[in-house]
Image (cartoon, helix red, strand yellow):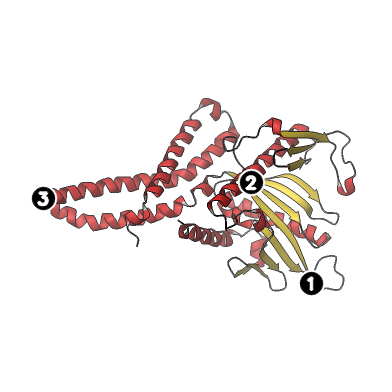
Amino acid sequence: MQSVNDIMTPAVRAKLDELAARRATLAQQLADPEVMGDHHAVRELSIAKAALDRIVDRYQLFTSLEAEHADLRAVIKSGEDVELASMAHEELPQLEDRASELAAELLEQLVTADDQSIGSLILEIRAGVGGDEAALWAGDVLEMYQKFAAQSGWSLEVMDLAAGEMGGVRHAIATISGEGAWAAMAHEAGTHCVKRVPATESEGRVHTSTATVAVLPEPTDVQIEVDPADVEEHITTSQGPGGQNVNKVATAVHLVHKPTGIEVRMQETKSQRQNREKAWRLLRARLYELERERQAAERAEARASQIGGAGRAERIRTYRYKDGIAVDHRLGESFNLDRTLSGDLQPIAAELQQQEIARRLSEL
């Protein structure tokens, strides 16, 4: 086991002090009467604070153990009371072991603290190669995540959905909110392949189709600000398959962020106001992710960020219907196909989180 001094470096202590200060700020914001009247803000701030509570409470316990350690050392050094010094000698090893264990726990929590503080995310699913079967598969992937969210106690709201001509979805955008949602879902970004006999296949041949998944952390207004002057807004009528107008009333919202060229379209509801709100949420999420990628590139130029653009093009999992398994290529393991598609993704998510924690610890 590493010593406390090896683990609790000045940089680690500075980061923990920063998290403690952030929790204090969140507590003050939650006590603000104006914030208390905004249910969305209260939910986001509460999730962020709950994530910090675990690590900050442990850090405070660790500092109290350090103070106790210093007191025992002082008693031993003074030698004024032989009986007290003897008791201190007996207590010291146990206290040091507990402090070392707590320091190791803190270090693991520290590298995941930012993940846990993200209260909601935006999920994008798009049909890939495979024609109509790809759209059917993308619909199955969306359903898998809907079941995973329900089992995990998260809220999932579909913001935009374009149905495939034979069923399924060509693309879908949804928000997922709840404690631990980002930490569990962040590793789902990438290409999901399926090998099965499509419903449209008359000769029973196995086809390979794909769906691509993007997972974006949804920032709060405090985390990212977008200057309205940098955004062009166009209001149009909703478009269906083939480009035909679905609604004669102009309710679809098209945003263009001029500095980056990022475009967002939203037409799911018949309300222009609701479509505008959802479009701005998606735009902020994409700009926030762009900034996260820039920072990650600065920290490690040779390594792509976990949710970087390149990662989305990688095949992360193959679902083999004939064998009844879902193979996660990052773990090199197979999981029961029926359970996976029914939303039982927690075993996969837990292993991927531990893999990521180990990687981050190795880079400290």
Q: Residues within 10 Å of mark 2 (few under 14, many from 20)?
A: some
Of label 2 and label 3, which has the lower sequence position?
Answer: 3
Secondary structure beneath disc 3? Answer: loop
Kind of residue at disc 1: Val
Front residue of 363 and 64: 363
Mark drawn on residue 79: 3
Image depth: mark 2 or mark 3 in front: 2
Mark drawn on residue 290: 2
Of label 1 and label 2, which has the lower sequence position?
Answer: 1
Rendered location of residue 282, percent (x, y): 69, 42
Q: Is residue 352 above or below residue 163?
A: below
- Quarter of the image for the N terminus: give it: bottom left
Of label 3 and label 1, which has the lower sequence position?
Answer: 3
Tell me what residue is drawn at x 52 percent, y 39 percent.
46
Kind of residue at disc 2: Leu
Q: Residues within 10 Å of mark 1 (few under 14, many from 20)?
A: some
Kind of residue at disc 3: Gly
Q: Residues within 10 Å of mark 3 (few under 14, many from 20)?
A: few
Rendered location of residue 280, percent (x, y): 69, 37
State the residue position of label 1. 206
Residue 206 shown left or right of residue 86 in the figure: right
Rendered location of residue 281, percent (x, y): 67, 39
Q: Are marks 3 and 1 in contact (CB under 8 Å)?
A: no
Instruction: Report the Cα–Cα distance between label 2 and label 3.
Output: 60 Å
